[in-house]
Amino acid sequence: MSKYFITILLSLSIITDLSANDREGTICGFIQEPLLFWLWSSTAPAPDSDRVSHLQFVEPAEYMTSDGKTLRGYKYLSNDGIGHQMPAKGYVLVALGNAMLADQIIGSLREYSELHYDVYIFDYRGYGNSDGKRRINAIIEDYKEIALSLNRLYERKLLYGISLGGAVMLNVIGSGVEYDAAVIDSSPSLLSDYGCPERIDPLVNLPQDASKLLIITGQKDSVLGDRMTSKLREGAQARGAKTVHGKRFSHPFMDRDYDIHHQRMELVRNYLLAQ
């Protein structure tokens, strides 16, 4: 969520509120929310299956939402790292940043699969290959459904939310969905400052016992600076979460070089798998 996009939100003042049952309704303003998501999605690349065609154990995945929209993405199957599929210990569900697509990110999650987890990642509705309109309420409700569905299939339940996806995952957690560990990587603390209802604020959805959370922020993050992320990090720490304010970290998947990115991904993986 860049400062330019935040300025657009602040400059538009029409605010509406709808119930979660009207999934594709706007809740952050009927002008600014569609405009914002259009701008975000326009910065994402086109879907490209060639990005994943060479990856063994990666297969297309689909999820049909309760309002009849098909979300498309990928599943990285649990394997032993030497060519054999293995029964999964659990799942890792990833919620993307606002200009990301599933085919860009799935390859970087290989190590979870080789440690015997099935990894799921979907394009948000209206993004990439997924059906529907791009709306924050819909994205949140979709991920609640997906997590509940996966919880019926797996014993271990791990969540990783990136940027906007961190806000989505905290709404999933705040709704009471069961999980074993979650990493929230560079989420804004508040969305209500920009016209959204307080009920979807990441800070509002922070659990009273946050001991199963790792909150990551970056001191070099030019997309979501400390003013936008510090309240969530500090609130989570006060409730027992582990927090890291990385000295060299930028925004997720935008770190300056591979070594920094690798350090960040190792931090995420080690936390999730140790819980």
Image (cartoon, rainbow, N blue to C red):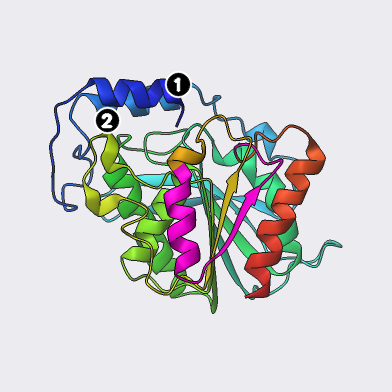
Can you give x and y, in whole percent of width and height, for residue 108 in the image?
A: 71, 47
Does residue 247 show up magenta in the picture? Answer: yes
Identify the residue shown where x is 70% and y is 39%: 53
In the displayed structure, does residue 219 sit left or right of residue 11? right
Please name the amino acid that badge 2 sits on. Glu
Closer-to-camera residue (6/32): 6
Residue 238: x percent and y percent? Answer: 46, 67
Give the secondary structure at mark 1: helix
Q: Residue at 71%, 55% (x, y): give it.
A: 57
The image quadrant that residue 45 belongs to is top right
Residue 49 covered by magenta stretch: no
Closer to the camera in the image, 266 or 47: 266
Q: Which residue is mark 2?
A: 33
- Dot 1 or dot 2: first in sequence order is 2
Do tag 1 and tag 2 residues touch (Cβ < 8 Å)?
no
- Residue span colored magenta: 229-251
Indicate whether 197 appears above or below 50: below
Task: Determine which residue is flagged by label 1.
Answer: 42
| Residue 199 location, quadrant | bottom left
